[in-house]
Amino acid sequence: MPSYNTSEFRKGLKVQMDGDPYHMIECNFVKPGKGQALYKCKLKNLLRGTVLDKTYKSGDTIEAADITEIEAQFLYRQTDKFVFMDNTSFEQYELNESQVDEAWKYLKEGMVCSMMLFNNNPISVTPPNHVVLKIEYCEPAVRGNTATNLTKPVKTETGAEFICPAFLEMGDSIRVDTRTGEYIERVRE
Amino acid sequence: MASHSSRASTDWRPTASWATLRRRAELLAELRGFFAERGFLEVETPLASADTVVDRHLDPLGLTLPDDPRRPDVGQRLWLQTSPEFAMKRLVAAGAGPIYQVAKAFRAAERGRWHNPEFTLVEWYRPGDDLAAGVSLLSELGERLLGRGPAEMLTYADAFRRHANVDPLAAPVAELADALRCAGQSWPDGLPVDEPHRDAWLDLVLDALVAPRLGLTRPAIVTHYPASQAALARVATDDPRVAERFELFAAGLELANGYHELLDADVLSERIARANAARQADGKPTLPVESRLLGAMRTGLPACAGCALGFDRLVAVAVGASSLDEVLAFPIERA
């Protein structure tokens, strides 16, 4: 694998340390007094989600990580396994619950997600920013109330709970933002 | 053509707001007034010079001055100044009184939130000044431009004892590493915990633990840097462990660096040789060992104090900016 020199350091770099892939989420150049140039970086472990502070001096290098992103269609869930298919190669990939993380809330059959591969193994999946889900269960709607300041939890077809306006009813469809987990609007189908 | 269209739409615009650029101009006028009231002469010295300051960690941009434009790589080697220090001291040696300059300075490989490879430096020298006079002039200037009161004075050792709980002049290097470890701070892999690397450890502690806590309510001036970091300051006669170097901090940011100036040409030659040896060990090109400044110093540089102020950073503190880009019309990516 090639490596990155400090002069190439920037937010978004995918690097590898001790066999784990990391995402550079922050990199600050500092140079105290008439001293040596330093790069203070925050690196997020893409397998564990933990964040590491690392300091580099100019000229240091970090190995690049073999990370690719593909489009993968969600096929089905089998107990604690989530099965996806690469849309171009038709190869199937399995992710476990911890790899899927919060994305399970949005996964509907046939949904096209962005999947990250590390050394050709899937490590995470990101659903589209906006997803439409059907409400499977909620308390009855408060009649005549269309204000959004009254809220209640609703349960969707994916089994996830969202906080929504109280006027929604079972069978309604809602659009949610997968980055924040927040309700956006009711969708008429 | 593709590269043209991709950088077309907004790249031509300034990154600073008009309100900030106006404030910047006001501060510059204020600064010129400050020096005029005190009888300083505004001077200009070459940005491109055959001489350059020799410092282990300062990298000047070199350029070739060709005689024949058809052979652009053949000609005289010049350096874009990392500061106008050498040339201004030559003016002092030639009999100038108090002088100041608002100059552009260039430093290679320096880009970050508080760094731009091209920046504005205000530099001044006043013959007859000692450390105390140099510090007090800097404090007055800071008070005038920032309006946050006179600077708090503390020594480098005080600052480290107060904010990192470690004595920078006496503590074993392992204690400096411990101070960082206890504060959850990291350092470069493979940086040896030993005496030859003391300055690197001091810089790490300064950057992570000390500087962010300096000058928060009013500016702070830190004096008596370790003699190993004297640069062009004289070593204190009453304590050879420290140099008569001083720095201004405001809002946790280093704004100015001053010296009770070294007068001894032989000592400067030694320091240049040491800096060049260190540069070579770092895999960097060495810089000219002979300079016209050495010639001036051999003839006699009058006792003086001098100081360089990062003007962009001062504006940033004055307007409460969170990066240098907010006070620059065009940072390097848009230059």
Image (tube, coloured by chain):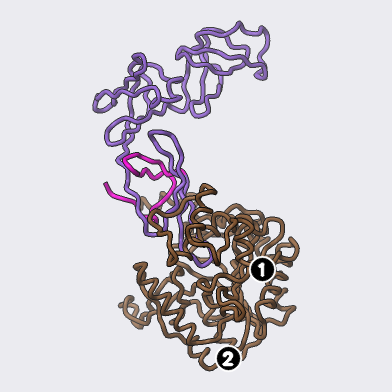
Residue at mark 1 to residue at mark 2: CA–CA distance: 27 Å
Q: Which residues are magenta?
A: A1-25
Q: Which mark is residue B2?
A: none
Mark 1: few/some/many CA within 10 Å (<14, 14-19, 20+): some
Q: Provide the letter of the chain coloured purple.
A: A
Residue identifier under label 1: B28
Q: Is residue A189 visible?
A: no
Cβ–Cβ under 8 Å for marks 1 and 2: no
- Magenta highlight on residue A16: yes
User: As shown in the figure, which amino acid type bears the numbered disc 1?
Assistant: Leu
> B233 and B113: which one is in front?
B233
Q: Residue at x 55, y 13 (%)?
A: A154
Residue identifier under label 2: B94
Work out whether B259 lies above or below B146.
Answer: below
User: As shown in the figure, which amino acid type bears the numbered disc 2?
Assistant: Ala
Using residue B59 as the reference point, say whether residue A182 is left or right of it.
right
Work out whether A137 lies above or below B135.
Answer: above
Count the numbered circles shown.
2
Q: Residue at x 57, y 73 (%)?
A: B242
- Please state the horizontal and vertical placement of residue B168, each as a whole percent of the image: 55, 64
Mark 2: few/some/many CA within 10 Å (<14, 14-19, 20+): some
Q: Chain of mark 1?
A: B
Q: Is residue B83 visible?
A: yes
Label 2 element class: loop
Q: Provide the letter of the chain coloured brown.
A: B
In the picture, residue B283 is in which quadrant?
bottom left
Work out whether B206 lies above or below A153.
Answer: below
- Please state the horizontal and vertical placement of residue B154, each as a whole percent of the image: 67, 66
Sequence-wise, the earlier of marks 1 and 2 is: 1
- Please state the horizontal and vertical placement of residue B241, each as a whole percent of the image: 55, 74
